[in-house]
Image (spheres, grey):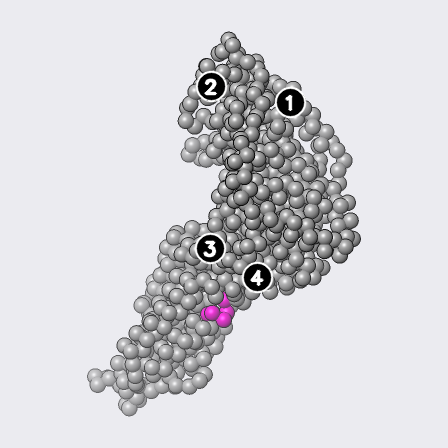
């Protein structure tokens, strides 16, 4: 076994005892977190008042068995056809027990988040995974409510307040058997546990809107995921964006949550650089470097192990700083060895020594034995699925939340309404009082086609806001908060009032001032077609967002698709003049502009009579009928009425929304299967274990 002793003849194998810093810094830390620390007595009092009320429920929760998670010889490889395969994790073995906090540490790029994603079943489709991952000794996916995952990026609705964000999430996640007051109570308690009681009524905020700090956003994300009191909690960089004091109290609350809710919780967190106080909260430590295990075992023994290999921790130094500095090879620094630090060796050599030492160490054998014992333990499975809010309740909550978000987000509808009104006024003044002259035949068609084409085209302006909503949906969907159908229904219902507003106000201006065909029925039909066209464009952009999540690429893609539809709608190129292969059959009939234009033309021209041109006339010497204009000028199909065109638009909305749902389902179900088959074809010699997302999401 290679050792650092060969580099230093006088290197000591004993470590300095870790000494804490003077109390001055500690008092500053306590002062900076007075708001967080001050909530402890409030929560104890709050829990005392409700203790008798929930005693029976707590007794049943106490009987629940915790979750033991074990992994053995786990390899993770990223597949790329151009550059080949690259190993990210190499033969990792470890375990996580109930009531304990396992910290995954290492320098940037060492594989912390990849290991966390592997254990949580969240690897990408181009990632291959081998090895054995067992939950309570069984190969299974965790049922909804038994696990939660807090991502590194805080994906939240920026228009909501902290209280609203947690309350809505509680209504979605907690079962209908709980009363509304109990759900609210759970949300309030969770907010206080994370020290956010002073920011309850502050909006989360985002681009262009000032809100809570980045650290507070991280705590809101944690609040949302611990509402169901999961027995297995994954946290990816939970302390990023937090100061040292807030990091300590947040991690302390996470580590001691089981004392408050009687849940033997298994916590696995990837942490980049914890403070000394946070480091002391860890029960076990998994230390990685370049995807290899440097150390796995009790966190308190890590510095002793490093010291025994010739890398003692200097006095008054944070243990985590010393560990990470020793195994970081990004900057190609020489590592000091020995008690006096009089010698140095390359960082890569130091890592090689530590990795090889761990592989042949007694501690590694203890980990292997513990994994084997936990794997063979006859522990109850976690197939029992916790209840979440019912489908109807989910739809109602999502509708209300989406309605509030749309109301507060100026870019969603309000900016569009202002632009639409400005455009409607412009159109009304340009086409004012069209009359029934021969020239008005073309002017009426141009006005109607512009309103249907370009006003609906501008709906893509709300795409960036919808992309942010989609990000929140994807996070909540992965954690099983609700299903795709509930999201589609909630988004559709919440948008109806705003679409009506955006339709009626500009529509009235652009309809009456130019003097389009009089009559309440004609005006309502005009608004119905415009309303359905706006819904169709929003449905189209939903499909684009599910395929192209980047908002800039999504806008370009959506604009391109709408441009083709607009060109084939029968106005710029008359239907009989469109080339038949591809463009007319089928794209001309796929474009919703075709039926919208035909319906609006029928609604406008049927029943009107126009003064003939001086050069020629219609079938009658005194006037040209609107029906003649439809057949001869615009080549409109007169074999069916305008109401059929309206019905077709309604059907297309349904098809678009269902297509969005199907795409989400295919992405979730089919993509991992295709990826695993492709991986097996690339590397048939190695067995591939594809672990499904532990959070079994509801199918609706």
Foreground disc of the pair 3, 4:
3
Mark 4–mark 1 distance (CA, rounded to whole Å): 50 Å
Circle 4 sits on which residue? Answer: 398
Kindly identify the residue that appears in the image at 71 percent across and 35 percent down: 137
Q: CA distance from mark 3 to mark 1?
A: 48 Å
Residue 113, horizontal then vertical, whole percent:
53, 37
Element under disc 1: helix
Q: Residue furthest top?
A: 9
Left or right for 473, reference 564: right
Residue at mark 1 = 363
- On-image quarter of the C terminus: bottom right
Residue identifier under label 3? 211
Which range is magenta? 495-499
Q: Say whether disc 3 or disc 1 marks the residue closer to the N-terminus.
A: 3
Q: Position of residue 627 (x, y in %)?
A: 37, 82
Q: How many marks?
A: 4
**Is there a contact, CB below 8 Å, between mark 2 and mark 1?**
no
- For image coordinates 47% across by 19% down, the residue present is 336
Q: Look at the picture and state if 58 lies above or below 26.
A: below
């Amino acid at each position: 076994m290679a050792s650092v002793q060969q580099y230093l003849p006088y290197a000591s194998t004993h470590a300095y005892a870790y000494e804490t810093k003077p109390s001055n810094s500690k008092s500053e830390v306590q002062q900076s977190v007075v708001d967080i620390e001050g909530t402890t007595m409030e929560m104890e009092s709050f829990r005392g008042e409700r203790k008798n009320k929930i005693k029976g429920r707590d007794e049943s929760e106490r009987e629940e068995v915790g979750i033991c998670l074990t992994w053995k010889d786990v390899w993770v490889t990223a597949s790329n056809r151009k550059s080949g395969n690259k190993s990210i994790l190499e033969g990792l073995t470890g375990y996580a027990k109930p009531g304990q906090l396992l910290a995954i540490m290492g320098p940037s790029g060492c594989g912390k988040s990849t290991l966390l994603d592997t254990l949580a079943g969240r690897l990408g489709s181009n990632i291959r995974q081998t090895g054995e991952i067992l939950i309570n000794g069984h190969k299974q996916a965790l049922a909804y409510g038994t696990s939660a995952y807090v991502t590194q990026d805080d994906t939240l609705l920026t228009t909501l307040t902290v209280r609203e964000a947690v309350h809505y999430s509680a209504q979605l996640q907690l079962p209908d058997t709980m009363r509304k007051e109990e759900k609210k109570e759970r949300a309030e308690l969770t907010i206080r546990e994370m020290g956010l009681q002073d920011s309850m009524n502050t909006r989360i905020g985002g681009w262009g809107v000032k809100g809570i700090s980045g650290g507070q956003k991280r705590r809101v994300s944690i609040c949302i995921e611990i509402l169901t009191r999961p027995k297995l909690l994954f946290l990816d960089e939970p302390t990023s964006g937090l100061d040292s004091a807030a990091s300590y109290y947040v991690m302390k609350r996470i580590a001691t949550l089981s004392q408050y809710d009687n849940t033997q919780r298994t916590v696995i967190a990837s942490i980049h650089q914890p403070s000394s106080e946070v480091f002391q909260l860890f029960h076990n430590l998994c230390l990685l470097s370049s995807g290899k295990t440097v150390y796995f075992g009790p966190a308190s023994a890590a510095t002793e192990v490093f010291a025994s290999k010739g890398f003692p921790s200097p006095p008054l130094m944070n243990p985590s700083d010393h560990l990470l500095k020793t195994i970081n090879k990004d900057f190609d620094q020489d590592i000091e060895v020995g008690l006096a630090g009089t010698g140095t060796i390359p960082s890569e050599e130091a890592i090689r020594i530590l990795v090889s030492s761990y592989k042949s160490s007694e501690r590694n054998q203890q980990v292997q034995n513990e994994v084997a014992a936990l794997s063979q333990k006859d522990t109850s499975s976690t197939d029992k699925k916790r209840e979440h809010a019912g489908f109807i309740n989910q739809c109602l909550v999502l509708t209300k939340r989406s309605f509030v978000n749309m109301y507060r987000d100026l870019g969603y509808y309000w900016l569009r309404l202002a632009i639409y009104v400005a455009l409607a006024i412009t159109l009304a003044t340009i086409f004012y009082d069209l009359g029934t002259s021969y020239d008005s035949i073309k002017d009426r068609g141009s006005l109607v086609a512009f309103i249907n084409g370009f006003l609906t085209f501008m709906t893509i302006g709300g795409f960036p806001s919808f992309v942010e909503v989609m990000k929140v949906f994807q996070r909540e969907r992965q954690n099983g908060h609700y299903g795709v159908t509930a999201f589609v229904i909630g988004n559709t219902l919440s948008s109806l009032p705003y679409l009506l507003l955006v339709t009626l106000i500009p529509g009235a201006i652009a309809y009456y001032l130019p003097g389009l065909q009089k009559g309440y029925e004609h005006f309502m039909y005009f608004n119905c077609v415009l309303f359905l066209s706006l819904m169709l464009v929003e449905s189209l952009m939903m499909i684009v967002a599910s395929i192209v999540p980047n908002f800039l690429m999504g806008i370009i893609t959506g604009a391109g698709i709408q441009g083709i539809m607009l060109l084939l709608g029968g106005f710029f190129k008359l239907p009989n003049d469109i080339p038949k292969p591809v463009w007319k059959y089928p794209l001309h009939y796929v474009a919703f502009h075709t039926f919208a234009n035909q319906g609006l033309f029928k609604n406008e021209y049927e029943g009107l009579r126009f003064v003939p041109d001086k050069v020629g006339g219609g079938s009658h010497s005194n006037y040209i009928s609107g029906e003649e204009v439809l057949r001869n000028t615009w080549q409109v199909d007169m074999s069916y009425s305008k109401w059929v065109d309206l019905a077709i638009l309604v059907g297309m909305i349904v098809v678009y929304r269902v297509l969005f749902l199907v795409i989400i389902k295919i992405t979730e179900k089919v993509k991992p299967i295709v990826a695993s088959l492709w991986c097996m074809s690339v590397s048939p010699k190695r067995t591939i274990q594809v672990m499904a997302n532990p959070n079994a999401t509801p199918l609706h």
